[in-house]
Amino acid sequence: MNEIKNCIGCQKPVRGRTDKKFCTEHCRNNYHNQLNAAENNLMRNINHVLSKNRKIMQEIMGNNLSVAKVSKEQLLMNGFQWRYFTHQQVNNKGNTFTYCYDFGYRIINEQQAVLIRDTLKKNKLSAEVNINLMES
């Protein structure tokens, strides 16, 4: 029973252990990369949109601001895509903030949104105070 198996990836003969499925590591990697290509491509595209959303908010806020009021139109003109975000957080006033990594937003009305920068949650209370001041 010395049956020669063929490689799953390239159909060349496989030598070695009886349970071996691929002729080389390169062939094994290619096979699995092709198998997962669609899922990996989807994730890559989503991560690209999330990164772009984050970059848009970061550019609008600059380096000095932790809170900024912005028009929704300005976000859209820069290519912001509302349906892509990493998480949402509700503050103690019941306001929901939608985040792309460490930058978040809350829609105030039909025309405006508030952007916030979450600096590792240590400035969470001061950001909420600033947002309340902007709303008054």
Image: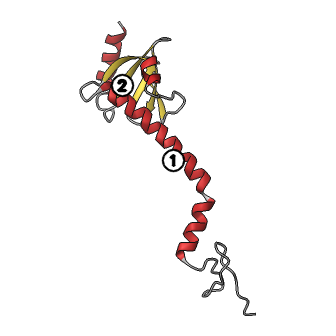
> Which label number is shown at residue 1?
none
Q: Amino acid at mark 2?
A: Ile
Residue 125 percent coordinates (x, y) = 31, 23
Image: 120 above or below 111: below
Residue linked to disc 1: 44
Crowd band around label 1 with a 10 angstrom C-alpha radius: few (<14), some (14–19), many (20+): few
User: Farthest residue toward the top?
Assistant: 136
Q: Earlier in the sequence, mark 1 or mark 2?
A: 1
Residue 132 percent coordinates (x, y) = 35, 13
Q: Secondary structure at mark 1?
A: helix
Quarter that holds the N terminus: bottom right
Q: Residue at left 64%, top 77%? A: 21
Residue linked to disc 2: 116
Choose between 9 and 134: the one closer to the eye.
9
Choose between 58 and 87: the one closer to the eye.
58
Image: 45 above or below 61: below
In-image side of 124 versus 28 (left or right): left
Q: Quadrant of residue 5?
A: bottom right
